[in-house]
Every structure is written in C-alpha cells, then in structure tokens.
Image: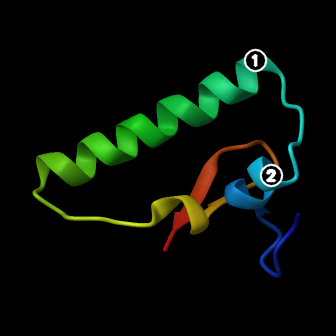
Amino acid sequence: MVTERGLADLYQLLEDDVSLPEETVQKIACQLVSALHYLHSHRVLHRGLWQNIGMNFDFVIDSIE
C-alpha cells in the first residue's frame, strides 16, 4: 500500500502478507529496534506503533506518528 505521502505503510504490508526479501526484513527490524531503544532510553512511553509506521520506497522508516 502507498499512502498519500508516497510512503509504504508497514502495517498494511504485513496485513496484505507481502513477501519481502530477508535482507529487507532485517533492515526494517533493525530500524524498529533502534527506534524503540531510543524512545525507551529517553523514557518515552508508546503504544500502537505498528499501525503508524511509514517507510520510503527503500524500506527506510520515514515516519512514526
């Protein structure tokens, strides 16, 4: 799925059961772990991130609302 900002929506990719190469999945997972570590290290609480993650077409996380 592509949003109005030209970003892929991670949640929708998972819902649509899109097949991604292992390297791409590793790239996305590392970015998510890094983002969560940053939030936790700054004592930021979060919930429901999975439905608000946008990526550019290189699968680089571009936005987390």
Question: As displayed, is residue 7 above or below residue 17?
Answer: below
Residue visible at 47% across and 42% down in the picture: 32
Residue 25 is left or right of residue 1, and the answer is left
- Residue 15 in percent (x, y) is at 79, 54
Dot 1 amino acid type: Glu
Q: Spatial distance from mark 1 to mark 2, Cα to Cα?
A: 15 Å
Label 2: which residue?
Answer: 13
- Residue 10 in percent (x, y) is at 70, 54
| Label 1, residues with CA under 10 Å away: few <14, some 14-19, many ≥20 | few
**Local SS, label 1:** helix
Label disc, if present, on residue 30 of the rendered structure: none
**Local SS, label 2:** helix
Label 1: which residue?
Answer: 22
| Label 2, residues with CA under 10 Å away: few <14, some 14-19, many ≥20 | some
Q: Quadrant of residue 46?
A: bottom left
Question: As displayed, is residue 23 above or below residue 15?
Answer: above
Residue visible at 65% across and 45% down in the picture: 60
Q: Nearer the viewer, residue 17 or 4?
A: 17
Residue 11 is left or right of residue 52, and the answer is right
Q: Quadrant of residue 1?
A: bottom right
Q: Nearer the viewer, residue 22 or 4?
A: 22
- Residue 43 in percent (x, y) is at 10, 57
Question: As displayed, is residue 34 above or below residue 11?
Answer: above
